Image (tube, rainbow, N blue to C red):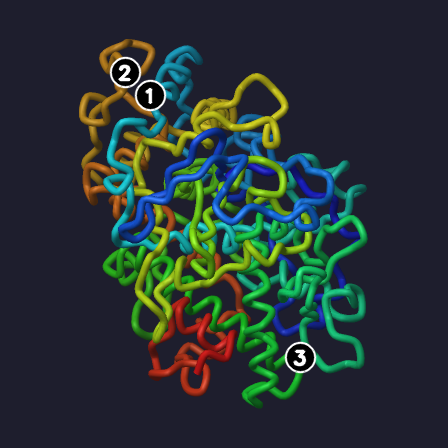
């Protein structure tokens, strides 16, 4: 859930108006990390050590071929995210402010730099103690996938240029899998099988494994290039394409529109009943969503309910909780001895950088990322706890991610929050009716320094709140409610979502093993034909 520069948009956005879900949604972040130097991955009770340049199961020369591509993370301000400081806190467009009467928090930069300096994982701590027993690591990347879908923006460049604050020309945020379906088969035919079958295109690549269709330079043909930035998110994208195809293969869908609707609705169900319930808690979800599919609004009340803005409190702070969940390296499969463990950032060909054909050695066995029914329970990658400690590769970003001297993702996040006018954590808590944590409780450096004004940056506040209130296993009171209310509010604004189109919808056989129960492991089981 990292910052992104605006991607090059498509020429226009009219084609999807003919699809059941309407137009694509707005875009933003990513959830990536890496490993440089020595990597220690604690996975499901195993300590798996590797060097970034010589990871277990080394890449063959053929698999390592191809130029390294610079990733677009931590590289700029998103169009419109500076609306509060440039147009006023009352303005709304692509972005807006949820708590408009809360002023931007602007402590001195040197205090933010000192705070960022203490936000790295300790090298001496037992790596198993850093793991979140409640959350398998796959949810880190599912969060990235969800974010990309919500924040995809195809606004034509000329329209962006005349509307730099994205007040009128922007895509509406939706959970409609625009990153998967693009602009439809007529305008993005490379995403689909030819012949009008309605199936998504899945290829057997040069390494003998299923992959996304790719161009000559190795980049994938996808509706959102961000879903090709690392080999975990690209394989998650591939998984949803396979789910779509299985809907057609099994006869539960007969047309492209049917398969899209089923895939979207099951994706939305997982957002609510697996992702949110796991990361904010079922009690927080129930606070905003009743048993009839009605969403309650407390503070997220966009002026235009048909084109809801994304609050900067959510996009620049709360949803960036995922940064702290990222591991330095991941167990991909245990098909060899030793098992294949790969860093996200490391030696070219050995790490998980994307925009290249999937190497066979880095093909994922999903039981290492999610609980998959009928598959071995371990070893499994667990997400890191939601806390104020970033994994070392995120704490010190490599040159493949940033080209300037500021390599600390924590520092970039804290300074960006100040520049974009984020309110303080205590100000948000007070307005939400939550007892605010003090700077001493939060562990800020020099908490009584007048530069802090007795307050703390919202992003740091949300991470530390999770540590103090939930041992880092889920978000706390402020963070959990912010994330849940915005995501459910976006889903509620979409009249084609299952909450509106069919509020009594529940997954059923043959897609779900048990009616009304459908988690990521069930999606994997159906998509891969495991039963």
Query: Are dots 3 and 2 in contact, CB under 8 Å?
Result: no
Whether residue 93 is visible to the viewer of this picture, yes or no, is: no
Residue 118 disc label: 1
Q: Is residue 243 above or below residue 151?
A: below
Query: Are dots 1 and 2 in contact, CB under 8 Å?
Result: yes
Whether residue 460 is visible to the viewer of this picture, yes or no, is: yes
Q: Is residue 194 left or right of residue 460?
A: right
Q: At 26% across and 47% down in the image, what residue appears?
A: 473
* Other-residue count near label 3 (Cα within 10 Å), few / some / many at <14 / 14–19 / ≥20: many
Q: Tag 3, which secondary structure?
A: helix
Q: At 35% across and 57% down in the image, what residue appears?
A: 276
Across and down, in percent, residue 302 comes to 48, 49
- Mark 1 vs mark 2, foreground winner is 1
Q: Residue furthest front?
A: 337
Q: At 30% across and 27% down in the image, what residue appears?
A: 122
As rendered, which of 62 and 8 lies closer to the eye?
62
Looking at marks 3 and 1 on the same chain, the residue that comes earlier in the sequence is marked by: 1
Please name the residue that numbered disc 2 is placed on.
445
Q: Tag 1, which secondary structure?
A: loop
Across and down, in percent, residue 314 comes to 43, 42
Across and down, in percent, residue 424 comes to 35, 28
Please name the residue that numbered disc 3 is placed on.
256
């Amino acid at each position: 859930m990292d910052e992104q520069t605006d991607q090059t948009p498509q020429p226009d956005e009219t084609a999807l108006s003919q699809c059941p879900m309407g137009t694509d949604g707005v875009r933003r972040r990513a959830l990536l990390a890496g490993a440089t130097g020595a990597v220690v991955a604690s996975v499901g009770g195993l300590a798996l050590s590797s060097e970034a340049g010589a990871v277990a199961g080394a890449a063959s020369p053929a698999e390592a071929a191809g130029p390294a591509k610079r990733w677009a993370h931590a590289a700029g301000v998103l169009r419109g995210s500076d609306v509060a400081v440039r147009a006023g806190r009352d303005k709304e467009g692509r972005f807006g402010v949820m708590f408009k009467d809360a002023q931007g928090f602007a402590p001195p930069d040197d205090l933010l730099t000192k705070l960022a300096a203490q936000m790295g994982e300790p090298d001496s701590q037992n790596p198993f103690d850093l793991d979140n027993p409640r959350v398998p690591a796959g949810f880190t990347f599912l969060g990235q996938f969800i974010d990309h879908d919500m924040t995809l923006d195809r606004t034509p460049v000329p329209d962006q240029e005349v509307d730099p604050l994205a007040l009128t020309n922007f895509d509406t945020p939706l959970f409609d899998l625009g990153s998967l379906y693009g602009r439809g088969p007529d305008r993005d035919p490379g995403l689909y099988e030819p012949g009008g079958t309605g199936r998504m295109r899945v290829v057997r690549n040069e390494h003998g494994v299923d992959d996304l269709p790719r161009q000559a330079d190795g980049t994938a043909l996808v509706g959102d290039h961000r879903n090709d930035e690392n080999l975990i998110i690209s394989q998650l994208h591939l998984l949803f394409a396979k789910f779509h195809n299985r809907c057609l293969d099994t006869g539960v869908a007969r047309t492209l529109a049917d398969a899209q609707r089923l895939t979207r609705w099951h994706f939305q169900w997982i957002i609510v009943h697996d992702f949110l319930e796991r990361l904010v808690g079922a009690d927080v979800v129930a606070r905003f969503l009743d048993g009839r599919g009605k969403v309650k609004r407390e503070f997220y009340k966009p002026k235009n309910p048909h084109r809801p803005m994304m609050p900067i409190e959510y996009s620049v702070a709360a949803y960036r909780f995922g940064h702290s969940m990222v591991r330095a390296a991941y167990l991909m499969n245990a098909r060899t001895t030793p098992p294949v463990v790969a860093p996200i950032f490391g030696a070219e060909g050995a790490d998980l950088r994307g925009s290249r054909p999937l190497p066979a050695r880095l093909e994922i066995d999903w039981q290492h990322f999610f609980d998959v029914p009928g598959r071995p329970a371990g070893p499994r990658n667990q997400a890191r706890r939601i806390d104020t400690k970033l994994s070392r590769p995120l704490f010190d970003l490599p040159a493949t991610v940033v080209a300037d001297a500021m390599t600390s993702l924590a520092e970039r996040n804290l300074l960006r929050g100040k520049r974009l006018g984020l309110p303080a954590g205590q100000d948000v808590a007070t307005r939400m009716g939550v007892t605010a944590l003090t700077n001493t409780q939060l562990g800020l450096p020099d908490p009584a320094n007048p530069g802090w004004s007795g307050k703390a940056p919202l992003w740091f506040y949300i991470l530390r709140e999770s540590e103090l209130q939930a041992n880092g296993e889920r978000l706390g009171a402020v963070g959990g409610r912010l994330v849940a209310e915005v995501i459910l509010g976006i889903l509620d604004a979409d009249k084609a979502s299952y909450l509106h189109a069919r509020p009594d919808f529940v997954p059923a056989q043959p897609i779900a093993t048990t009616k009304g129960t459908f988690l990521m492991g069930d999606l994997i089981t159906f998509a891969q034909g495991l039963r």
